[in-house]
Amino acid sequence: MSSVLISDLGEHHGVRFLLARDEPTHPELPGNKWRKLKYNLREADRLGLNTLLTFGGAYSNHLAALAAAGRLLGRPTIGFVRGDELAHRPLNPTLARARADGMALHFLDRETYRRKHEPDVLAELLHETGPAYVLPEGGSNVLALPGCAELAQELLTRLDFDVLAVACGTGGTLAGLLTGLAGQRQALGLAALKGADFLRADINQLTQQATGRTYLNWELRTDYHGGGYAKLGPALRQFIVNFRQQHGILLDPIYTGKLLWGLFDLAAKGHFRRGSTIVAVHTGGLQAWAGFGGEPV
Ligand SMILES: Cc1ncc(COP(=O)(O)O)c(C=O)c1O
């Protein structure tokens, strides 16, 4: 994989900001998507499972990316979508694109969806679809971590920084970055969903599974969700528009917009030591704009 692009975002309140642009690395599997998939694909091959199966909400970047991966790699993909089928008619742009990429979409009522990883529920779903390699929601399992760790390792060798910051949904990307940092520097996650305190335990569990340990050099902020998952209020939208005008870089409406918005706010409040350098990761997610009436202008 080619190395990640670094953009200098200048100084804000005495703190230097860099953006590690992982989103153009692979246009169809942007940012954390390819990183999380990479070692899972190897495992699927090892197990002799050609079909890839996963779960997601109707706007899931992960569903979209897995469908694109299936098309690019010539592998069948199956997506279980949260919610009744009728509620998703007509298909939104994310789901329409996933289907166009060849993903077989199945809809699960919310109760079954909630129980999807219980062994008997999963067995029944696989009975319906036939054998497949199962990726959890968001693609965040233990094998998602080493691909994300590679990004942290690359950044450590290329840049002098104090804090590595990333937006969190399931926490798998932050967990992977932590294993790559291996206790060096600080990491900061900003949760994109409301009530995300549970993520701390999930992240510790993932790093424990992957490397046999948990880390202390990180913090999760749960107060920059902007009203909840996929909520894009006028102030956040305006921030994203201004950011694009100033830096020529488009952020996504669900994750990275909130990340940069939150980081600049934290800098304004004196959260970071003056003179420190923060590297924020642009994890992609731009396909989601299609579900928000298109890219902002
Ligand atoms: C663009 C983008 N950024 C960040 C994240 C958060 O990643 P994670 O679920 O690993 O916390 C996601 C979700 O997968 C995403 O699509």
Image: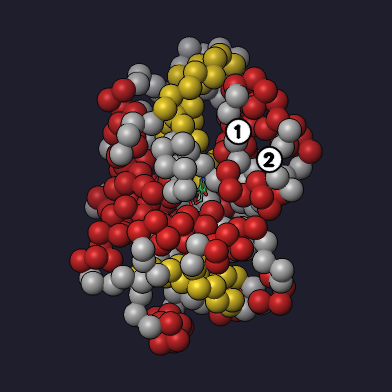
> Which residue is painted at 54% across and 54% down in the image?
61
| Disc 2 residue crowd, few under 14, some 14–19, many 20+, Cα 10 Å | some
The dot on residue 117 is none
In terms of image quadrants, where is residue 267?
A: top right
> Which residue is painted at 42% across and 27% down in the image?
5
In terms of image quadrants, where is residue 294?
A: top right
Q: Is residue 276 above or below residue 66?
A: above
Residue 198 visible (yes or no): no
The colour scheme used here is secondary structure
Q: Position of residue 123 (x, y in %)?
A: 40, 84
Residue 152 visible (yes or no): yes
Query: Ligand 1 near label 2 (Cβ, under 8 Å)?
Result: no
In-image side of 78 versus 290 (left or right): left
Closer to the N terminus: mark 2 or mark 1?
Answer: 1
Please give the residue where the numbered disc 1 appears in the rendered image.
250
> Which residue is painted at 29% across and 48% down in the image?
146
101 or 231, which is in the foreground? 101
Q: Is residue 141 above or below residue 16?
A: below
Q: Which quadrant, please, contains the C terminus?
A: top right
In-image side of 161 versus 7 (left or right): left
Q: Is residue 279 above or below residue 257?
A: above
Q: Name the amino acid, label 1.
A: Leu
> Which residue is painted at 58% across and 28% down in the image?
249
In-image side of 292 versus 109 (left or right): right
The dot on residue 295 is 2
Q: Residue furthest left?
A: 46
Label 2 to label 1, Cα distance in Å? 8 Å
Q: Position of residue 71 (x, y in %)?
A: 42, 60
